[in-house]
Amino acid sequence: MKLPIVILFLLFIIGCDPIDDKLIIDNQTQNKIYFALSPHDHLSKLFEEGLDKFNVEVTYKNYVNEIEADSKQRQLLTGGGNAWERYINETCQDSMLRVFTFNIDTLNKYSWSEIIEKNYYLKKIELSVKDLEKQGWQIKFH
């Protein structure tokens, strides 16, 4: 009886997609940071791919992550140990990952479509695989 359970467990483990978690957001500031990772040069592309086509209310919470002050957060991507490299080189425009940062007051005051239309982000960082390798796959905010 135990053998079928062990076999099912092994099949389940083998069938799971491995995770690439090497990309780390390192918030060395004393404030929360609000950010979005994007393969696109402009936020409008994220909106065009948006959830509104599926009748989901689109807010910044659909796209923007937050990281607490003085903390690190691993960014997970399925597909194995080099999934981030493949994603950046094959999916990201010009093989550059973009990190957009936002002010929480802006996120609370404006709709996601207004934020995108008016480019209400604080900063945009563009990183290639080589850039990230040089930084030890860490994106640091000071």
Image (spheres, rainbow, N blue to C red):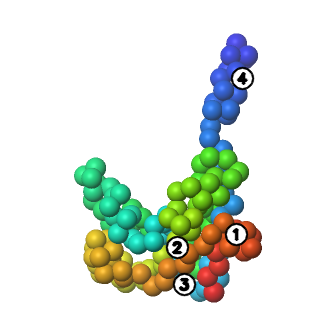
Mark 1 belongs to which amino acid?
Lys
Expressed as whole percent of the image width and height from the top left, the position of residue 52 reads 27, 57
Find disc 3 in the rendering and name its residue.
31
Find disc 1 in the rendering and name its residue.
130
Mark 4 belongs to which amino acid?
Val
Split into 4 quadrants, where in the image is the N terminus? top right
Gap in angstroms between the C-alphas marked 1 and 4: 42 Å
Expressed as whole percent of the image width and height from the top left, the position of residue 25 reads 62, 71
Q: Which residue is at 55% across, 78% downward?
A: 125
Question: Relative to 53, does residue 141 appear above or below in the rendering?
Answer: below
Split into 4 quadrants, where in the image is the C terminus? bottom right
Find disc 4 in the rendering and name its residue.
6
Mark found first going from the N terminus, 3 or 4? 4
Q: Secondary structure at mark 4?
A: helix
Mark found first going from the N terminus, 4 or 2? 4
User: Disc 2, disc 1: CB below 8 Å?
Assistant: no
In the rendered structure, find residue 99 and report the number of the disc placed on it: 2
Q: Which residue is at 65% across, 82% downward?
A: 28
